[in-house]
Amino acid sequence: MNKPAIKPNNKTTVVTTDDILVMLCKSVTDVLANANANMVTYSALVQKITKTSLKPDIGSFVLFDGGFSGLVVINFSAAAAIEIYQSYMTNMGIPLSELSTQHTSDDVGNVMGELLNQILGDFTSLVGKELQTSITQSQPKMLTVNKQLIISIDTNLDRPQARRVTFTTQNGNIFYLELAMDRTEFIKLHDFVPEEFDPDEIIRGASEQAKTNQTDNKSGPDFDQDLLDELGI
């Protein structure tokens, strides 16, 4: 686990947007594998898309900024969300009979939000380790939606790029990751030894942060207005 996402070569190393996408996909598979004790895989092919959107049944998004800016969207089908949620909870020792079977449950949304927070925590650590730059993330937003909602970053990107990757759970359920960010390149000027880190410590830290942030979550009109403001609507 946590093998370098970027393979060194004898020529000048150039890290592109798609390499950063691979790092993000690696964080998704690593965190979910640890959390669920299940295998999650992603397609070897990536789609170029022109816009990012929240789609049914559970959509989530995170903004990040710093060394580069971007938007991460993950759209889960109801079946994929329930499978991941139940696998995560049973892996923690909670009986299946006590778990929700509806993707609209608050428990499902809270768990998916916590996992997304862990994924982004792992991703930001990889960015710091392998790209020697820093990015910060917003609090993940989880929404149960029944129609497509187009979302975008409330800032001007000079050369925007958007990608979509298909993920498959152990039981064959599908979910999608979308990444929008400026087209960028990192060029290695000299060799360096990436700083080692403890992935379990990162996941624990992200989990604790998610629990802290949950106390600030609202489900009423104020939350809806905050969300609309963040989306620029």
Image: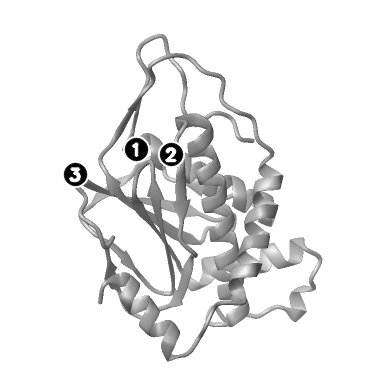
Q: Which mark is residue 159?
A: 3
Colouring: one colour
Residue at image x 69%, y 39%? 198
Q: Amino acid at mark 1?
A: Asp
Q: Which mark is residue 116?
A: none
Q: Nearer the viewer, mark 3 or mark 2?
A: 3
| Residue at numbered disc 1 | 18
**Figure quadrant of the C terminus:** bottom left
Q: Which mark is residue 22?
A: 2
Residue 104 spot, x, y in % from top left: 53, 82
Q: Is residue 9 left or right of residue 116?
A: left
Residue at image x 53%, y 65%? 80
Residue 215 spot, x, y in % from top left: 62, 77
**Is there any visible trace of residue 92 in the rendered image?**
yes
Q: Residues within 10 Å of mark 1 (few under 14, many from 20)?
A: some
Q: Secondary structure at mark 1?
A: helix
Residue 61 spot, x, y in % from top left: 41, 64
Q: Secondary structure at mark 2?
A: helix
Instruction: Measure the alpha-carbon separation of dots 1 and 2.
Output: 6 Å
Q: Amino acid at mark 2?
A: Val
